[in-house]
Image (tube, rainbow, N blue to C red):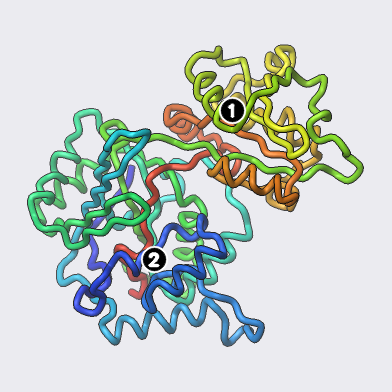
Amino acid sequence: MPEIKAFRGWRYNKEKNKDLAKVYAPPYDVISKKQQEALYQKNPFNVIRLELGKETPSDNAKNNKYIRAGRILSDWQSSEVLSQEESPALYVHLQDYVEEGKKKSRLGFIAAMKINEKETLKHENTLASPKKDRMALLKEVKTNLSPIFGLFEDPQALINRELKGALRRTPEIDVTTDGVRHRIYLETDPSVILKIKNAMRSKPMFIADGHHRFEVACQYKNWSLSKNKTAAPEASYRYVMTYFADCLNNPFKIFPTHRLVKAPKGMKDPLGALAGLGKLEKVKNLAVVLKALEKYRQDTPKKEYNFGVYTKKDGFYIFTLDSKLARRVKQNPVDSLDVAVLHSALISPVYKIHVIAKSEAIDFTRSAEEAKAKVDAGTFSAAFFLRPTSLKEMLLASKKGLKMPQKSTYFYPKLLTGLVFHSLHD
């Protein structure tokens, strides 16, 4: 049950930044090296310099990308590249986008959420390396640069009705990037903020995206409290900047994250290694694979598992797991997921990839075309294509306190980094 509050965010000063679309960036964990460089070139004040700084050969304990980010943020604040809100606000966020040829809009808001690890519902296991990276950055910038992505269920749509009042005003931010229009409206009316705050107290919060950032926020709070035993109950580091959206009254589609694997040493036939585990059906191309998976998602019984497979030598196939193996799958909200079965029935026993966090033999991508390209380039031996996890499946796993495999969900559209910053200095 989240406890939220309005806050005085820092935002890019429009007087100093005439084209705001050039200062924002996607979430750090979806940015490739090529995209990172492009964002650096896009604008000298692009948030990439804070969120995902460049490393140099001379980096050391006293001068590295984290320390530079803290210095840059301080410079931007003192030079008014960034300016702080005059009054505490909720940041009402409207996204317009096209999905499968249809225009859609998603309404949510950004607030500061009091950190409560026990009551925040999570669905994904996290990795040590990204948490170490984010903690090192947070200690230097002392600011939430991007929000956690949270979902709640509001059957009566009461909160959306309150949020829509802000849409009658002129947006503070109105930018379009990567085909998504982002608008930010300020809600500073104390009476409206109080209504939303009180309504949110009865809504369990599910993390859709940002598990690593949330766990790091918990670590940072504990680290800060260890240095200040008399910290005020409202100290800003007891909170984490969070985006909230009503998943019952907004469009939500989860996209799959496809898998790329390297065959173990000595395996000459990555496709043939699947023999005996199921049926392989040759198909013409990637489009046929994706269309078939979409159909299977809607039409097949729960205990049938279908995946697309591609190798450079053999081309595209639909793989259907043997019915005897399918019947052995534990029918709980996590073990029965397509992504879990792919790992337990194929990737782990066949390709000997048992611990994802410690393996360089596996990679992930939302782009099916990118997966094919990496196999064609010889970087990986085979690509596996999945149908997506549903929102219902994700919520059920979260409610049961179960953790799905890494990279089980990909929510679209993503949130932009840099729309608003939440300072943790007090």
For residue 157, what is the image quadrant? Answer: top left
Name above or below for residue 299 compared with residue 156: above
Within 10 angstroms of label 2, few (less than 14), some, or many (20 or more) residues? many
| Numbered badge on residue 145 | 2
Which callout, 2 or 1, points at the residue further toward the start of the chain?
Answer: 2
Question: Looking at the image, how many numbered discs can be counted on the residues?
Answer: 2
Whole-percent x, y for residue 394 in the image: 47, 33
- Residue at the (33%, 70%) spot, across then down: 423
Whole-percent x, y for residue 336 in the image: 60, 24
Q: Residue furthest front?
A: 284
Name above or below for residue 91 compared with residue 80: above
> Which amino acid type corresponds to the residue marked 1 in the rendered image?
Val
- Residue at the (56%, 16%) spot, across then down: 302
Name above or below for residue 112 compared with residue 63: above
> Which amino acid type corresponds to the residue marked 2 in the rendered image?
Leu
| Numbered badge on residue 119 | none
On the question of residue 114 being in view, the answer is no
- Residue at the (73%, 17%) spot, across then down: 279
Q: Give SS at disc 2.
A: loop
Quadrant placement of the N terminus? top left
Q: Give SS at disc 1.
A: helix
Distance from disc 2 to disc 1, alpha carbons, whole Å, reads 38 Å
Give the residue number, with chain letter if any, for mark 1: 289
Left or right: where does residue 114 sit relative to residue 169? right
Left or right: where does residue 413 sit relative to residue 351? left
